[in-house]
Amino acid sequence: MGRKSRHLWAYFRQKPIRLKSRYDRWRQVAKEQKISRSALGRLEWIIFYETKSTFNVLFTCRHFGISSKTFYKYLKRFDSADFTTLEEKSRAPIHVRQKQITSQQEQRIITLRRLYMNYGKEKLREEYKELYGADISAHKIYYTIAKHHLYKNPAKVERAHNRSGYYLAKKRITTLKRKNRMMLGHLIQVDTIVLHLFGLKRYIITAIDLFGKVAYARCYKNQSSFSAADFLQRLNYLLDDKIVNVQTDNGSEFAKYFERACNSLGIDHYFSRVRTPKDNAVLERFNRTLQEEWLDEGNFAENIDEMNRRLTEWLVFYNFKRRHYSLDNISPINYLIKYRQVLPMSPTSTRD
């Protein structure tokens, strides 16, 4: 074969085709199917499970901070030909319970109620039975009275509801007037991280001061307002009774006992707006740091006292040593010292 022939053969010969890996093809098809970001994240669970963890479920769950129950649910549902199977399904019930009371029954109850405003639901039930020759449940009578506000004294009922907090308007964080130069404790953001790991449920309540970025967290076994109140008492002691305002989301743990703790400590409670993550952005960033720098490092423990001990050790590092870009690259405690807002836990404090 001559030189020219060799050149032509080298030019026209078929070049090797490099095929993408199976997992790269999965990612490409998933994007073409335009699935949500959360579904793409679940696809990464599956890929990690089959590659780096070598089909180890516990290692995968620990890496992503998810429960094995959640992982198995999406693994069972997963179909490599249809990545929409990784989307979260609606949790609305398929069969919705229909209203049991008929329009005729409702109208009869309204008529009787207007005739006997002093009667309770049981007495009205007997009147209904005698007049119409049919029995009706006391619940239906109560439902109709409440629906149409057929109360003898509506103002009194409304005051009772307000005292119990049913119709009490929440103070939104947008109504809080910020100072030109914020001080320690002017606004503390509080939130809850829910953990489902190794068949256990744990709740880490977190808090951060918007001025000095001093942070605190504690782990609890339940998500109750009693736990949140205990957390607030500890946080108030830590900050030397300097808390002026707290901001939380609309979770049930920040009601009842938490509200009572706020009132007893003289702290104003503000709420974030619904579906507005930017209202709580500083604490969300701290929660992410806690996840990446503490929880992902294997600090989860079955014993809650041991877990809180590890958490406290990390918080000491976070507050005293860890540098923050927003604080001129110094730690929160050193930032407070710089602005002469020393806490009792500060090494420069002379308090006993």
Image (cartoon, rainbow, N blue to C red):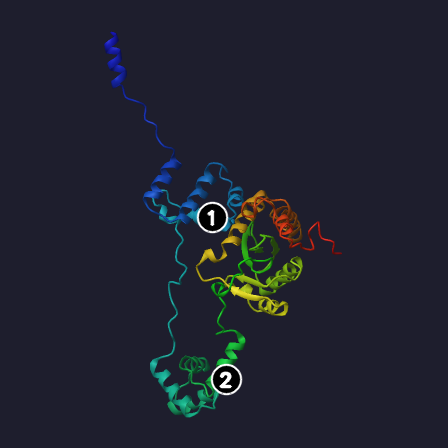
In the rendered image, the residue lying farthest to the right is: 352
Label 2, label 1: how far apart the Cα atoms are = 53 Å
Relative to the observer, which residue lies in front, 172 or 333? 333
> Could you say where residue 145 lies in the image, as x and y percent from the top left?
43, 83
Check the image and report above or below for 118 versus 253: below
> Could you say where residue 319 lies in the image, as x and y percent from the top left?
62, 49
Q: Is residue 296 visible?
A: yes
What amino acid is labelled 2 in the image? Lys
Q: Which residue is mark 1?
A: 72
Check the image and report above or below for 276 versus 326: below
Could you tell me which secondary element the residue under label 1 belongs to?
Answer: helix
Relative to the observer, which residue lies in front, 84 or 295? 295
> Could you say where residue 49 lies in the image, as x and y percent from the top left?
47, 40
Check the image and report above or below for 244 versus 142: above
Q: Which residue is mark 2?
A: 156
Is the residue marked by circle 1 packed among few (<14), some (14-19), or many (20+) residues within 10 Å?
few
The disc placed on residue 149 is: none
Mark 2 or mark 1, whichever is nearer to me: 2
Q: Which residue is at 74% across, 54% downward?
A: 350
Q: Which residue is at 56% across, 67% downward?
A: 268
What amino acid is labelled 1 in the image? Tyr
Relative to the observer, which residue lies in front, 110 or 226? 226
Check the image and report above or below for 228 versus 74: below
Please identify the quadrant where the N terminus is shown: top left
